Image: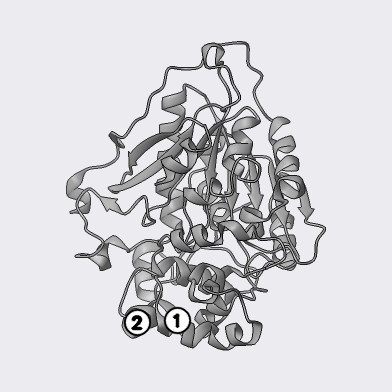
Amino acid sequence: MQDDYIRQEGYPAERHTVITADGYNLTLHRIPYSRNEDQTTLTRKPAVLVQHGILCSSTDWVIAGPNSSLAFILSDAGYDVWLANSRGNTYSRNHVTLDPAREPEKFWDFSWHEMGTIDLPNTIDYILDKTGEPDLNYVGHSMGTAIFYVLCSERPEYQDKVRSMAAMAPIAYLNHVKSPIMTFLSSVADPLAWLCNSLGYYEFRPNGKILLFAGKAFCEANSLAEGVCDNLLFLYAGYDSKRLIKSILPIILAHTPAGASARQLTHFAQLMKRDQWFGQYNYNKQKNMEKYGQPEPPAYDLTGITVPVALYHAQNDWLSSVEDVKVLAGRLPNVAERKIVPFPEFNHLDFLWANDVKNIVYDDMIGFMKRYDRKYADVALRPSAEVDANVVHSDFIVSDVA
């Protein structure tokens, strides 16, 4: 369990559950203060929400240990750390009325659009309510960056609740993707229909046919570490043997992929087919007319994003290419900094598990966040305890999702 990884390193761990406006149960893991702090003199501190990428979970931020895991590093830097889990992953597979196994078509009927328009605002509201803070910092990796742009575009009022946004391996425009899985899906006329009809599922999960269609030849040609080529996360995002902390590879393989809907992958594949376009899910002309009032899905408007954004990306990234991030940076109006990792082999997953990621990325990112932190007097930390009680969002009505 995630809590065990946190506690075994001497940090306090809390578990919180948010029920979204459409009934999904989202688990939040919290590290309220550092193991290095005197518990008798704890003071109020800024909150930070850390959002994982696709096929991942909050576990990814703690398994590399105190010296390399972002969650612990943020805690030691003076933050109240909240680790998100998107709908459908290992820790967020429950729903008020739907069962993912018995009603897969209904349960998995979402993309990262719903994460940006429902999950993220509901989660932010919960954290601010629990901490008494007026705003928080946001850190995202991969899909975790895309859903933040969706939030700012579709729920712009939430920008007042976010002080800064740090984006690692940012995802929006996808015209230079090298991932075998994504390249294959983008070549299929209707990726969702193919995934559901050919493979027979709505959740994107390990399946021999995926390896056969998308990555078998690649794996055979690149003799990757044992187990890696059978793992969808590495086949999707890439693998670099030079910097990955080898000792945690068995833990990574045991926890990933953590679950995702087929529609999430399809939505990204659709972006690859359009030139420098970042927008909502494309159903078909008839359903688009019903849902959007127009035959084509609308693009997300990034021009109104006021939150200061820092972009961190790498040259050897299968998903977040230098060319595509450059387009994103040109369309975001408030980019405070954009930094390319100065090592040509650094890849998409090295932002999570590289042996020197603290020095390469995290220290600079924390410096960026500190520039926007609120200044605190020595106010006592709000009392807290481990929580595992469902909190139903005020927008949720059971009859709406039954």
Is residue 98 positioned above or below 159 on the image? Answer: below
Type of amino acid under label 2: Leu
Q: Position of residue 179 (x, y in %)?
A: 60, 75
Of labels 2 and 1, earlier in sequence is: 2
- On residue 210, the disc is 1
Q: Position of residue 169 (x, y in %)?
A: 65, 58
- Quarter of the figure with residue 175: bottom right
Is residue 394 positioned above or below 256 on the image? Answer: above
Q: Residues within 10 Å of mark 1 (few under 14, many from 20)?
A: some
For disc 2, the marked residue is 199
Left or right: 307 as drawn, with respect to 189: right
Residue that sits furthest to the right in the current view: 342
Q: Is residue 152 something one can see in this rendering?
A: no
Instruction: Decide which of 279, 238 is in the foreground and name it.
Output: 238
Is residue 121 positioned above or below 174 on the image? Answer: above
Considering the image in quadrants, where does the C terminus appear?
A: bottom left
Is residue 330 positioned above or below 296 on the image? Answer: above
Type of amino acid under label 1: Ile
**What SS does tag 1 mark?**
helix
Q: Position of residue 45 (x, y in %)?
A: 58, 22
Q: Residue at (50%, 28%) from the top-left corner?
A: 32
- On residue 177, the disc is none
**What SS does tag 2 mark?**
loop
Instruction: Decide which of 46, 57 is in the foreground and name it.
Output: 57
Q: Residue at (66%, 27%) from the top-left corner?
A: 373
**Label pair 2/1, CB-CB below 8 angstroms:** yes
Q: Position of residue 300 (x, y in %)?
A: 55, 57
Q: Is residue 218 something one can see in this rendering?
A: yes
Instruction: Decide which of 217, 193 is in the foreground and name it.
Output: 217
